[in-house]
Amino acid sequence: MQICSAREIAAFVQDGDTIVIGGCGWGLATPEALLEAIEQRFLSTGHPKNLFIINSLSIGDGDKRGLNRFAHKGMLRGIISSHFALTPSLQKLISQDKLEAYCLPAGVIQQLIREIGAGRPGLLTRTGLGTFVDPRHGGGKCSKSCKHDLVELLHLHGQEYLRYRPFKIDLALICGSAADTKGNLSLDEEAVTLDCLSLAMAAHNSGGHCFAQVRNIVESGSLPARSVAIPGVFLDALVETPGQTIAYDTPYSPALSGDIKPSHRRIQNEPNEIARKVIARRAAEELIENAAVNIGFGVPAGVRFTEQRKKLAEQIWLSCEHGHHNGQFLGDTLYGAAQGSEALLSSLDQFDFYNGGGLDIAFLGMSEVDRHGNVNLSKIGGKIVGPGSFIDISQNARKLVFCGLLTGVDTRVEYRKDKLKITRNGTHTKFVEQIDHVTFNAINARNNGQEVLYVTERAVFQLGPNGLVLTEVAPGIKPKRDVLAHMGFACKVDVQRKMPEHIFNALGGANN
């Protein structure tokens, strides 16, 4: 097995190469040293140029690291990813139509790469039907310069499917904890497993190459067989980076890798804002014993800290798309990591579980909702953000609870004398006549028998046969004045009860 420097790996990359890159979020399991070396070579020589990169869960720090390193004029010709919030420099290039940009669900990208590695003719799935990745609604193309149709519609046995087409992979860049001198690679000290094995296999079986960055290299035979996640036959060279962190600016931690369990769980409190507390508590009313549950980030994350969730902690099975099960899921710059997990799967296996219908209930965010119940979470203010895992999860969970403020983040409320009062409505109309980017398709959900709720701080809606139905309001809230007047369409009203009174207990006064 060749042991090289990051600079030598960068010199191997050719103009026009198609590269799959492992890692996610703020540097979890990311070959950052390799990405930096490729960037530095380009800045010095103008090569490699016209690269096409693929990454499923997005890598970046909102500034210069991760996939942001490819956002130099001429360096990149195209990208496939599921999310762009951490790569503003790429968002800018996309908005300026300076590269081919395709946005696909994270799970679909990972499963497609596995199919490429297995030599199969692409990925056949129903995930993505009716959304912006459906070829009838754009096929995931995010810029006018897109030249390829990556998705096609097929009909089999009376049902619609999407076929995501395969492509040749020239290089895979991955990250591991340790490797021996034969190239056998372990991920034991990483916070996530992700899809490293399928990336390496796809590159190898496409006739390409796979390079791995590791914290240290050990003698051949010193790694236990069950610790080897990727056999050396899939790799072409190793780069040893002794200072490698477990995430950006986060050193290796046995608590994050799962090598030890914390002696006690960190106290996790509800959100500070009254509005978000109400949403989290009302959404958590939908939890049931023995349910397989996914809780998204942002407003839905508050569900994890409610009293209902704490009471049911041992009776529900909580997981995230990164592969953690029943752990203390972390946020901010460690989103995707967890402490005290009972199990850690590869994200690819986790997506198979989700796409196969394994989730009983999912709590997800909503940036915009239209009269039909469709949800947009992937294009905000005209800027492509991407769905991440949202489509994989929302299209296949048996029950969905969308969570969000009725009129945007600047909404202000207070709770006094057993009544909720809106002291300031937000400036963003979230419930609109029609959304222009469909991340969740309500018609498909009804046809698939999914139960769907939309929980806000002042009202709850359900997905009915003909669209949204207002079914609950908070105490003190007038449906016409406080809800319908702040929506962009007329909504059917069938309010038969108020939001449960106990969720307003101990809320206190004004929202902060």
Image (cartoon, grey):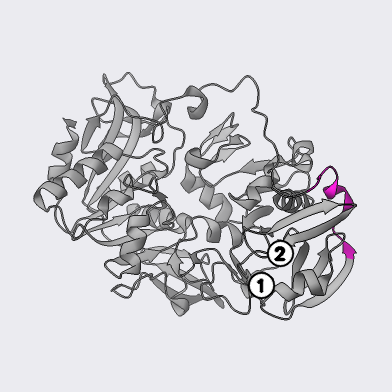
Label 1 sits on a secondary structure element that is loop
Q: Is residue 417 left or right of residue 299?
A: right
**Circle 2: residue type:** Val
Label 2 sits on a secondary structure element that is strand
In the rendering, at what x and y percent does residue 314 appear? 74, 35
Q: Is residue 413 left or right of residue 394?
A: right
In the rendering, at what x and y percent does residue 340 appear? 59, 28
Pointer 1: what residue? 373
Q: Is residue 104 left or right of residue 130?
A: left
**Circle 1: residue type:** Gly
Q: Is residue 506 magenta?
A: yes
Q: Classify 93 as above or below 292.
A: below
Q: Is residue 359 magenta?
A: no
Q: Look at 81% across and 44% down and name the residue there.
A: 508
Instruction: Quarter of the image for the N terminus: give it.
Output: top left
Pointer 2: what residue? 452
Q: Is residue 125 left or right of residue 471?
A: left
Task: Report if residue 10 is visible in the image.
Answer: yes
Q: Specify the farthest residue to the left.
A: 45
Viewer-nearest residue: 230 or 486: 486
In the rendering, at what x and y percent does residue 231 appear? 32, 34
In the rendering, at what x and y percent does residue 50 appear? 19, 60
Write the start and end of the magenta stretch as one range: 497-509
Task: Report if residue 119 is visible in the image.
Answer: no
Q: Look at 65% across and 64% down and name the residue there.
A: 426
Q: In the figure, residue 481 lies in which quadrant?
A: bottom right
Marks 1 and 2, the one that precedes in the sequence: 1
Which of the two discs, 1 and 2, sits closer to the camera? Answer: 1
